[in-house]
Image (cartoon, rainbow, N blue to C red):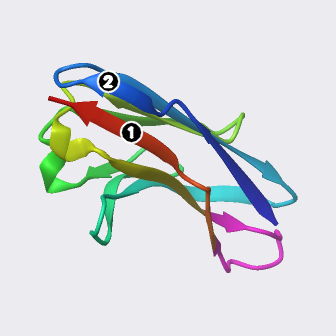
Amino acid sequence: QVQLMESGGGLVQAGGSLRLSCAASGTFFNIDTMAWYRQGSGLGRELVAIITRDGSTHYGDFVEGRFTISRDNDKNTVTLQMNNLKPADTAVYYCNTLARLRSTTLRTDAYWGQGTRVTVSS
């Protein structure tokens, strides 16, 4: 099993920055992809950014170069640096990972953190 602990949410004014962090712990063989999703009030969950184990990244169209995702494979952590935040970025941000629990299988299982709230005031 994998547990994900998020930190770094909070209240910030438009144009400000926040840094979200997520640490994976538990019993597993390795962590495959790590990602951040978000869910605004009354909206569905959407992908913010994803990073593979080898460092390849992909961002949601709305990011427009404002966010940077990074990871530390040795510490099993992922970080989302968010700059030039907009009120539209207000949401609960969730950490997600695909993890291999055993070396004897290529199967990966998805795990979610409990979410951290980001509020951007205008």
Q: Residues within 10 Å of mark 1 (few under 14, many from 20)?
A: many
Q: Decide: marks 1, 2 in contact (CB < 8 A)?
A: yes
Q: Residue 108: within the magenta?
A: yes
The magenta span reads: 98-109
Residue 47 is situated, as x and y percent measured from the top left of the image, at 33, 61
Seen as rendered, the residue at the extreme right is 27
Residue type, label 2: Val
Residue at 30% across, 58% down: 40
Residue marked by disc 1: 118
Q: Is residue 104 above or below residue 21?
A: below
Q: Nearer the viewer, residue 28 or 88?
A: 88
Q: Please state if 66 lies on the left or on the right of 78 as rendered.
A: left
Q: Nearer the viewer, residue 57 or 105?
A: 57
Q: Residue 41: within the magenta?
A: no
Residue 12 sits in which quadrant? top left
- Name the dominant secondary structure of the magenta segment: loop
Residue 48 is situated, as x and y percent measured from the top left of the image, at 31, 52
